[in-house]
C-alpha cells in the first residue's frame, strides 16, 4: 500500500466502473470513435484502471441489485459497471470527470442497447448530487472514500454502498468478498448499508427506556426501568432494521420517523418504542 500511495499521490485511483448521465446529457463529447483508454492514465483525482468484469458482477451481487434500484457509479471510467447494472434491469448513472471516458461509455451503452437505462455524465463527484441513488459503487483511494463518507452516511437509510478494493476507514463493512477467477489485480470488494440514526433514548410502550449509543451500524446501550438497568448485546442496524438482545430475549424491529416496532423471540410478542426527542 505504501508503494501504491507513493505512485498515486498526485493522481488518485479513478478505477473503472461505469457511469450514467440523465437523458438530457446523452450527447457524447467530441472524442475519436477509436479512443481506447490506457491503464494508469492520469485523471483529476485518480489514475484510471479497469475493474475486472468478474468483480463488477460480484459487486452488483453484494449490492443485491434489482430492477427497482437506481445505481450511481462514482468515477465510472469505461462504463462497464453502469452498463452491467442496466443489463440487469436497473437504471444506472455514471459520474466521470474525463470527457473521453464519458463518450466511450455512451457509445458502449448504445452498442449494448441499454442507453435509456445507462447514462453518463461529465462531472466532479465532489460537486454532484447523488442522494437519490439506492446503490452507490466506487473505485477510489481511501482518502477520497473518507472525504465522501459524511455524504454517504447522510444518504437514505438502506442505501447500499460497494467499493472496489478500498474501505471507509473505521466504518466496518457489512461484508467483504474477493474474486479469485478472471481478476488480475484489485479483486476485493467491500459492502456497507447506510444505517438509520437511532442514538438516544427510546420509550417503550411498557414504560421501559431503551438508551442507545451508535457507531455507524453498531449499537450499544441499556434497557432500564427505574433502578433496574440491563445491558443490551448483539445490537446493530441493517439499514432501517434494528436487532438487539436483552437477557434471553431477542428483539428485531424496523425504525421509521422516530418510531420503532417489531417482535420479540421470533414473534412471541410485539414491541414498539418512540423517541420523544
Image: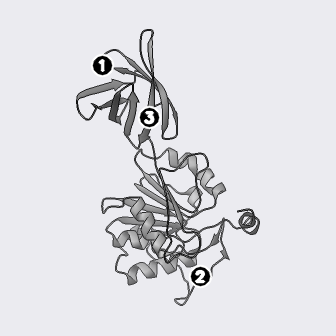
- Up the image or down, 273 lies above or below 214; here it is above
Residue at position x 42%, y 57% in the image: 135
Residue 237 in sight here? yes
> At numbered mark 2, what does the secondary structure look like: helix, strand or loop?
loop
Residue marked by disc 2 = 37
Q: Quadrant of the N terminus?
A: bottom right
In 3D space, how far apart are the residues under numbered discs 1 and 2 (Cα atoms)?
A: 61 Å
The residue mark sitting in front, 2 or 3, is 3
The front one of 153 and 177 is: 177
Q: Marks 1 and 2: CB-CB under 8 Å? A: no
Q: Position of residue 88 (x, y in %)?
A: 33, 69
- Would you identify the image quadrant in which residue 23 lies? bottom left
Residue furthest front as drawn: 248
Q: Which mark is residue 205?
A: 1
Q: Residue at x 60, y 68 (%)?
A: 14
- Circle 1 packing at 10 Å, graded few (<14), some (14-19), many (20+), is few
Quarter of the picture containing the C terminus is: top left
Q: Earlier in the sequence, mark 2 or mark 3?
A: 2
Q: Is residue 277 visible?
A: no
N-terminal of the pair, mark 1 or mark 2, is 2
Q: Position of residue 241 (x, y in %)?
A: 36, 40
Per the image, the residue denoted by label 3 is: 235
Q: Earlier in the sequence, mark 3 or mark 1?
A: 1
Residue 251 located left or right of residue 232: left
> Residue 148 at x, y = what percent?
58, 52
Residue placed most toward the observer, 85 or 21: 85
Q: CA distance from mark 2 to mark 3?
A: 46 Å
Give me the C-alpha separation between circle 3 and circle 1. Answer: 20 Å
Which is nearer the eye, 29 or 3?
Answer: 3
Amino acid at each position: 500500500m505504501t508503494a501504491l500511495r507513493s505512485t498515486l499521490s498526485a493522481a488518485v485511483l479513478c478505477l473503472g466502473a461505469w457511469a450514467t448521465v440523465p437523458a438530457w446529457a446523452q450527447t457524447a463529447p467530441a472524442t475519436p470513435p477509436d479512443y481506447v483508454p490506457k491503464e494508469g492514465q492520469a485523471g483529476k483525482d485518480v489514475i484510471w484502471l479497469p475493474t475486472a468484469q468478474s468483480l463488477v458482477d460480484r459487486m452488483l451481487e453484494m449490492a443485491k441489485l434489482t430492477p427497482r434500484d437506481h445505481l450511481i457509479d462514482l468515477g465510472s471510467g469505461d462504463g462497464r459497471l453502469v452498463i452491467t447494472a442496466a443489463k440487469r434491469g436497473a437504471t444506472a448513472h455514471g459520474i466521470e470527470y474525463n470527457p473521453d471516458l464519458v463518450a466511450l461509455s455512451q457509445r458502449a451503452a448504445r452498442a449494448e442497447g441499454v442507453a435509456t437505462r445507462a447514462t453518463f455524465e461529465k462531472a466532479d463527484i465532489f460537486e454532484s448530487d447523488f442522494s437519490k441513488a439506492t446503490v452507490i459503487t466506487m473505485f477510489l483511494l481511501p482518502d477520497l472514500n473518507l472525504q465522501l463518507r459524511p455524504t454517504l452516511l447522510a444518504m437514505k437509510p438502506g442505501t447500499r454502498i460497494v467499493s472496489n478494493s478500498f474501505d471507509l476507514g473505521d466504518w466496518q463493512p457489512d461484508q467483504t468478498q474477493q474474486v479469485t477467477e478472471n481478476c488480475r489485480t484489485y479483486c476485493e470488494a467491500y459492502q456497507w448499508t447506510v444505517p438509520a440514526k437511532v442514538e438516544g433514548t427510546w420509550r417503550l410502550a411498557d414504560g421501559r427506556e431503551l438508551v442507545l449509543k451508535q457507531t455507524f451500524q453498531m449499537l450499544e446501550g441499556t434497557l432500564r426501568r427505574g433502578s433496574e438497568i440491563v445491558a443490551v448485546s448483539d445490537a446493530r442496524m441493517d439499514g432501517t432494521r434494528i436487532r438487539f438482545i436483552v437477557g434471553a430475549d431477542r428483539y428485531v424491529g424496523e425504525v421509521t420517523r422516530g418510531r420503532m416496532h417489531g417482535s420479540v423471540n421470533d414473534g412471541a410478542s410485539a414491541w414498539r418504542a418512540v423517541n420523544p426527542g
